Amino acid sequence: MAVKIRKVKKRRGFPVKMKFSTKEEVNAYFDEEKLLCLYCGNRYEALFKHLQISHDITPDEYRKEFGLPWRIGLAGTRLKKKLRKIMNGQRKEGILPMRPSEEHMKKLRKSIKNRRPSTDVAKNSWHRRGLEAHGRTEPWGATDFEEYLRRIRTGRTLTEVGKDDDMPSREVFDEYLRTNLAFREKFERAWDMLPFSVQIRGNRLGLRFEREVMDLKKRGFTSVRIAKVLNVSESVIRGRISNICKDKGRAKVKRIKSVIE
């Protein structure tokens, strides 16, 4: 059954064109007895029904548009206190369990696998904690990441450099790689030239390793002999050959399907 849209009067200045970017902004927004609707400017104890009936959107669509955290309920402090009191009473009476059930935990673990994208608030909070841990106030810049790469070129892994007190963490470096294509290409070239022992230690084998393995395989070398030539373990060679064959198999199936279709 379709929901009947009920229009409400919008106050001047609404809808707002903004996204929350800091934890302080989010806390101030939710620290009200009634929550402000950023579409119309009216206040409600909870926005769930209001958003659907008056604006024809879901709570998650609202959160996404304004950069609000996914897991904070769209309700004011008055309603949250009331619901918290009811739940605590039900726990004392045995109606609700004191701890989440195993079934609930399974659903929670499953939801984590299908995690929604991080909001700017979460990213900024994470970055700020990382800077504070290094005693910094200014964000990491291009010069810092170039120095990170220089240290990698000396034969160290991403994780090892990320533990240096004056360097960003491995996670921050990975994010920089994802958002800066030119720098990522520079990193990939530098990483590919490192000794295979370093690549294995960093759990990141490059294309040069793959080419050399397949070249030796075509020349009739066994996995044991390839491992000795490249100075790595036999299990690494067997695993790499298996992955290469799987990738080629998937590519072949894809080509066949494209011809059939």
Image (spheres, helix red, strand yellow):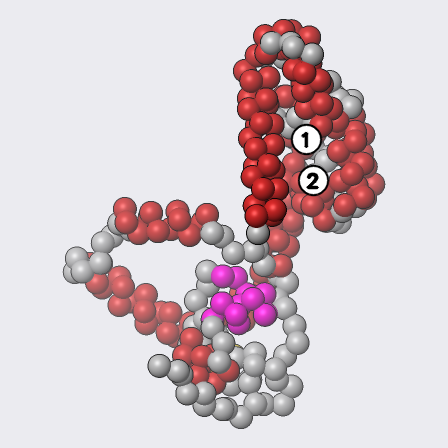
**Cα gap from disc 1 to disc 2, whole angstroms:** 8 Å
Q: Which residue is drawn at 54% across and 15% down?
A: 235
* Main SS class of the magenta portion in the image: helix
Is residue 68 rendered magenta in the image?
Answer: yes
Q: Looking at the rendering, which quadrant does residue 231 occupy?
A: top right
Residue 158's tag is: 1
For the residue pair 233 and 180, the one nearer the viewer reads as: 233
Q: Which residue is drawn at 27% across and 64% down?
A: 87
Q: Looking at the rendering, which quadrant does residue 135 occupy?
A: top right
Which residues are drawn in magenta? 59-70
User: Residue 98's spot in the image, x, y percent?
Assistant: 25, 52
Is residue 217 shown left or right of residue 260? right
- Tag 1: residue type? Leu
User: Residue 116's spot in the image, x, y percent?
Assistant: 52, 56
Residue 43 higher or lower than 137, as above or below: below
| Secondary structure of residue under mark 2 | helix
For label 2, the residue is: 173
Residue 233's tag is: none
Q: Which residue is drawn at 61% across and 66% down?
A: 20
Point out the residue furthest to the left here.
93
